Amino acid sequence: MEKLLFNEMNISIGTKKAIEELGFSTPTDIQSEAIPKILEGNDIVGLAQTGTGKTFSFAIPMIEKIDSKNRNVQALVMLPTRELALQVYAEYVKLLKFNREIKLATIYGGQSYDKQMKDLKAKPQIIIGTPGRIIDHMNRGNLDFSNIKMLVLDEADEMLKMGFIDDIETVLKTTPENRLTALFSATMPDEIRRVSKKYLHNPVNITIKAKTLTVDKTKQLYYEVKQSSKTDLLIRLLDFYSFNSAMVFCNTKSMVDELTTILKEHDYAADGIHGDLKQMQRDRVMNSFRNGLTKILIATDVAARGIDVKGVEAVFNYDLPQDDESYVHRIGRTGRAGLSGMSLSFVTGKGKNRVSEIERYTKSKMEKAEIPSIDEIVKQKQKKIYSEITEIIDNSEKKNTYKPIINKLLAEGYDGIDILNALIDKIVKEEVKEYNEIEIEQPYSRKKKEHNRKDKNGKEISYSYYQINLGRNDGFKPKDFVEFMSSITKIPNYCFGDIILHNNKISFELRPDMNKKIVLVQGKKVKGFTLNLRKLSKLE
């Protein structure tokens, strides 16, 4: 069925004009299906991911159902976080540009009661808020939902995760049974299904299938690292890439606090945000990040819900998320609006299976990356300094301002290179930085059984040691490697001893009587790839 355009829908002229000014003409899939159904008076259950346009799908029909002359609360939107409440509120304000008679109020924890009481005294017809503070105002007698026409539960699965299910049911019980209800969720856990069945009336089910994650603008990398070295790895990568704006996701509030403290101690413009911060602190942190004063924002998934910041260059998964959808939400914050972006995930031993699970879910590949060496970081910084200098030279209108000083230095015998070194040193003012060694997960090692390490006379074999430029990244496992080498050298499998598999190389033991055969692989081309064999003094 062909989609109706917004200007073809049964909505008021003022709403249509507001939508047009926002630059929208064609609704998204969820908007196309939900808006007409709600306008017809149907309860709906919308299964859709964040970013599919859910807010307009319930905000537009809700506005149409409000009687602007009636000063009672007629509609309620409940969401899991303050940030999401504020984001949804901002969308409503845009839609009401030409319908100022309809009033709104946001109710959420962390904001002063005085401010909220003032807003409620203005007799808003629509309340947007979080369950905890809504219950609080209900208990104080500040909110009356007996005239509710429409109720929306947005991101219901997140509210369930945060323990709001009892609060949600408490609110639902205080609203009229003939109200219209719309429930939106990215997933449908049993508890949400139960609430839907109990409180919604013959709902229309709308499922918007998650589209394949768009990764053409987002480069997805992952780094294998030991848990104890994750912070050191983060510091290396921050220095290597020098992002102007990055988000770092942790799974716990305590890790956000710990990482924020460490990065600040290392002079990074970093700050953290999680659910335990007061609203004033959260606002300060977010304003600083939006304005570019804070370059690195460290956050939990829950705190980041509703945060919409443009120009985030990279997302770090310091802790891999526990569910696939959170990964999509996280990396969706970079590479927006045609800009390129990066996702960098830290994978510890227990998390290796998660990479495969995420790849299956997103139908995209995460590229395994090598940890940059100290030399590589230094070279990268030098490239940046070079770019900055050439940009100043190319764009400067004062090219001859300091020529007398330069000429005087040269006349007094100072070397030009020494002069430049001193000037760069003065500008950069950067101390030589020391980096901790980073421990990675130990490479896979295949050990031969002891009885296989002796010849037929029972004498211990003294193996030769070699290394070749093949590895895990080329799809090899120890067994595959032995079979491959045997196929091109005719060396029997039993002649290979211990094998250590790295990402880009393999170290192995070989019986010494096979040394003449193994050297024949040097320079051999296999499928356009040139083999490079190196003899070792020990297995490494």
Image (cartoon, rainbow, N blue to C red):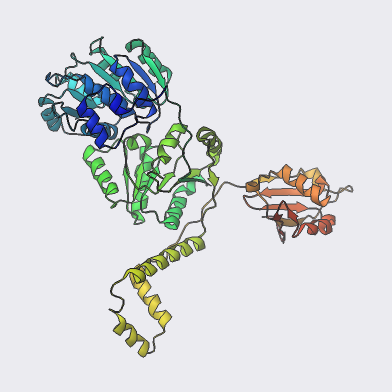
Q: Position of residue 102 (x, y in %)?
A: 16, 26
Residue 519 sits in which quadrant? bottom right
Instruction: Judge from the rendering whether residue 432 lies leftward or rightward of residue 132; answer left or right.
Output: right
Residue 320 or 458: which is nearer the viewer?
Answer: 320
Q: Position of residue 484 (x, y in %)?
A: 76, 47
Instruction: Judge from the rendering whether residue 398 lies leftward or rightward of residue 248; answer left or right.
Output: left
Please name the residue shown 48% across and 42% down the image. Answer: 215
Please name the residue shown 47% across and 60% down the image. Answer: 377
Q: Compared with residue 433, is residue 490 higher up or lower down, i.e. above or below?
A: above
Please name the residue shown 46% across and 62% down the image. Answer: 380
Instruction: Judge from the rendering whether residue 281 lies leftward or rightward of residue 456; answer left or right.
Output: left
Decide if residue 165 is in sight here. no
Residue 395 sits in which quadrant? bottom left
Decide if residue 148 is in sight here. yes
Q: Position of residue 178 (x, y in %)?
A: 25, 9
Please name the residue shown 86% across and 48% down the image. Answer: 458
The quadrant in which the N terminus is found is top left
